[in-house]
Each structure stands twice: as C-alpha cells, then as structure tokens.
Amino acid sequence: MKAFDLVIRGGTIVTPAGTMHADIGIEGERISAIGTDLHGREEIDARGLYVFPGLIDVHVHLQMPAGDIVTTDDFFTGTAAAACGGTTTIIDFIEQLPDESLRAAADARRAEADGKVAVDYSLHLTGNSSAPAFLEEIAALVREGYTSLKLYTTYTDLMVDDKDILRLLETCKSHGLLPIVHAENDAIIAYEQARLLSAGMTAPRYHPHSRPCTAEAEAVQRVLALAAVVNTPVYFVHISCAESLEAVERARAAGQTAYVEVTPQHLLLDDQVYDQPGFEGAKYCCAPPLRPRRHLDALWQGLQWGKVQTVATDHCPWDFATQRQRGRDNFTLIPNGLPSIETRAMLLYHFGVNAGRISLPRFVELCATAPALLFGLAPRKGDIAVGADADLVLWDPGREIILSAGSLHQRVDYCPYEGWKVRGAPHTVLLRGRVIVRDGKFVGAPGMGRFVPRTPFRPPFRGGMTNERAH
C-alpha cells in the first residue's frame, strides 16, 4: 500500500460543494489523494476538526508607506499573523510613486516581500495613469502573473478621472485583468471635510460624516456606468452601504457582471464606536467608515443570498499611541485603516457560521474558493482537490479565544475587537504541505512563502452572483 509523505487523517473536509469525512494524502507540496484508510510516513490526526482549504485574503496593506509613516505590519509579521488566522495566501498592492514606472514599482515591492513572507502572496497593480507607456507596462506585467488592477476614485496621489478609468477598463478587458475599485466620490469627501473643519468639528466622531454613504454609492454607480460602456466586469472592494449593494443589483439585473467584497469591520462594527470618550474613536477610522446598523444587516443579507462574493480584510494597521495621534486636532490627519488579517476567519466563523447566518460551505467559498477563482489562483489555491497546493487549515470548532492585542500576532498596539470571545479557530495550518501553525502557534519562518503568478481573469460567476441563498 502506498505511503504518502503526509496524511491528514480523519477530518471533516469542507468545500463549497459540501462536507465529507476523508483522509488527505500529500506528496511534496501538492494534494495527491483524497480517500479512506490512506497511510503516510507522517500523519496528522484531524478527528474532531474541520479541514478547510488554505484561506485567501485578497486585500491587505503590509509595509505600506503613507507620507512619512508606514503600516506597522511588515511582510513577515503580517503574513505570520495571517497564518495564525488560517490564511495561507494574501494579495497586497503595488502603488507606484508619481514619476515611477510600474515595472520599477513592481520590482521594488517584490524585493520587499521576497524572503520575508511566511505565506504565499501576489500583488495587485494600481492604475493611476492612462498614458500609453503606462498601459503598455500593464500589458507586459499581465504576462508575469499580475492580473488585477486597482482603481481609486479618491486620494489625490492615486485617483483617476472618468476618462482615465475608461481607458484603464479597456486595458483590463483587452489583457485579462480584473479591475478592482475603491469607490468614493472625492469631491463630496473634500467638501464635507472642509465644512466640518471650518465649523470646529475636528474630533474622530466627525469622520463618518465626512465620508457619507452618498459618496460611496455615487462612485459605485458611476464606475458601473463606465464599465457598462466598456462591457467589462468590475470588482468593488470594501463595500459598506446598502445603497451601494442596491446599485450593484440594478446593474446585474441589466446584464452587467459585478463583484462585491466586504470586510469584517463593516459586518460587525457600527458608527457608534466613533462616539467613545476622548480620542478612542480614532482607532476605528477607516475608509469607507463604519456605518449605522441597518447597513450591517444589508451586508449580512448580501452574504446569505450570494450578492457578496468575498470577505477580505483591507488590513491596514496603524499604532494608536503614535501614528493615529497625529490626527488629535484634525480627524482628516488620522491614518485610515483597521487591523484584521489574523481575526477575519474567526470573526466570520463565530458571527456567521455559529450564529446560523451562513453555512460551513459558504464560509469556505467566501474566504477561499471564490477569491481563488476571481483572482486567478485556482486551481492551485482555494480548494481541496487532487493536484492543488496542500494549503490546509485544520479548524477546531470548539476552541474559544478572547481577542486581544496582547495575544494576537498582528504587530499593532490595539485590537478593534478587544475582549470579544469567539468560538472556532485554526488548530494546525499547512502551507504547501509544511506545517506553519501548530496548536494555534506560529512555527513557520520568514521566506517560507512565495510569489504566486496568477492566470488572466475569466468571469467565474454569471452576472457576478455566487449561489443564490448560498448553501
């Protein structure tokens, strides 16, 4: 009888198709067999545990500069934290300087990550120009596995206007990139910020008033209109408003293909956190901001009915004691972003699966399989299948954790969910057949991760919808 290098024995395998009790045989870095009574030179007992494909976070900001500050998690600490949360692949960003070529920016970003990452990674391109030379660089980088392009409708150094968006969408369509969009109306934000500051409203509690739902919904509708002209799919990051989801639904009903990402913070935290005493509200400043409770309910319904395709983090950690303090007298100077690269899956499992809002297969679809399909990582990533990378998460449904900045691996001095108790967490995590988390503790090393070239984008879901009344 064949002996595999490693066998994961007796677990309950979970994929979007359902659950099954089976062993997994691993040869080298790949899954070689799925069946019963498999034997390995090494074996891991997974009885009583779920076995998920390695989770994928398609939206993180590690070692990201913003002016004279840099996010607190570098490519090692951030990916080690990701691993402890069950994530085995992340996608970060290339954001080139105004006079820097896209090629130079890509090479520089790779140099920062290679040799440091503890999980596999890839990179999104950023489209902040439509100059012919820039479009040619995009086409060349697609051939090297960079197959998604971020578009911003706000932030001075990154945003592009409508005519540029049209050209960039054309380039995406021609060369097989998925356009991903940060959708907020920059003019509305600038107007509201100036109005609030001139009235002396400088505290963090005014942050959500400066980026209203109107700003997001308008930008979503505008980008959808531009995408309709070009006839290309579009993916919206960190959607936070019911009105934005409604705009996407109208576009889908008219025949467009559009995808929606949500984050844990927009599912679980509402705008009341900004009203805490003193400067505490600064811990929750992100863009788009946290919303009133009705929007959270709409996002959960989107998850339940297949209107939302992925849950990613937008992990963007800034220390409260130092970096966020620069906005003490002016909320617009507080660096935006929340940390959640380690807590994403535990939060979604506890408040989604345990609460009966989503099923186990839907959880895997949102956190692993749909991200892999959308971003050109399948069939290597996102599924438990023969030939796939042996990225696996052995999940203990009974393990209880109290979330705390002091116990998490994220390198940041606070946790937005401080003191929250969750049930269900990773026990063991494998990256390409090697254990990198054991008993919830990181046992990997810098450089164990690799850059993963991605295949050109091909729409995996009709109209952008995943399964209706998903699972």
Image (tube, rainbow, N blue to C red):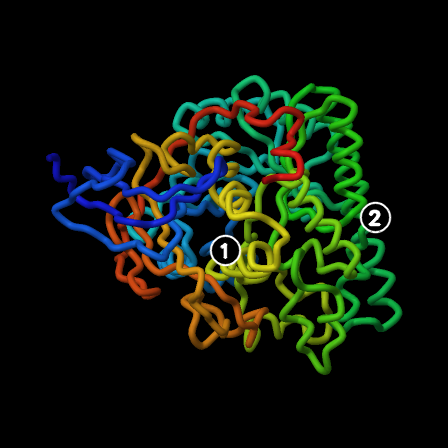
Question: Does residue 97 appear anywhere in the picture?
Answer: no
Task: Between residue 468 and residue 340, name the one nearer to us.
Answer: 468
Q: In the rendered image of this protein, does residue 362 appear above or below residue 344?
A: above
Determine which residue is flagged by label 2: 214
What is the spatial separation of the Cα atoms under label 2 and label 1, in whole angstroms? 30 Å
Asked whether the beta carbons under mark 2 and mark 1 sit within 8 Å of each other, the answer is: no
Circle 1: element type:
helix
Who is closer to the viewer here, 116 or 339? 339
User: x%, y% of residue 195?
Assistant: 87, 61
> Counting residues from the N terminus, which is met first, the one under dot 2 or under dot 1?
2
**Count of all numbered marks drawn on residues in the image:** 2
Callout 2: few (<14), some (14-19), or many (20+) C-alpha neighbours within 10 Å?
some
Q: Which residue is mark 1?
A: 345
Q: Which residue type carries mark 2? A: Thr
Residue at 56%, 72% (x, y): give it: 420
Crowding at mark 1 (Cα within 10 Å: few <14, some 14-19, many 20+): many
- Return the x and y of residue 147 as percentages of the image width and height: 48, 30
Horizontal side of residue 46 vs 279, given as left or right: left
Q: Is residue 88 left or right of residue 152?
A: left
Looking at the image, which residue sits at the far top? 174
**Viewer-nearest of discs 2 and 1:** 1
Q: Quadrant of the N terminus?
A: top left
In this rendering, does residue 44 appear at all?
yes
Q: Amino acid at mark 1?
A: Ala
- Identify the mark at residue 146; answer none if there is no mark: none
- Quadrant of the rendered image containing residue 103: top left
In percent of width and height, residue 314 lies at 56, 52
Provide residue 184's location: percent of width, then percent of height: 74, 46
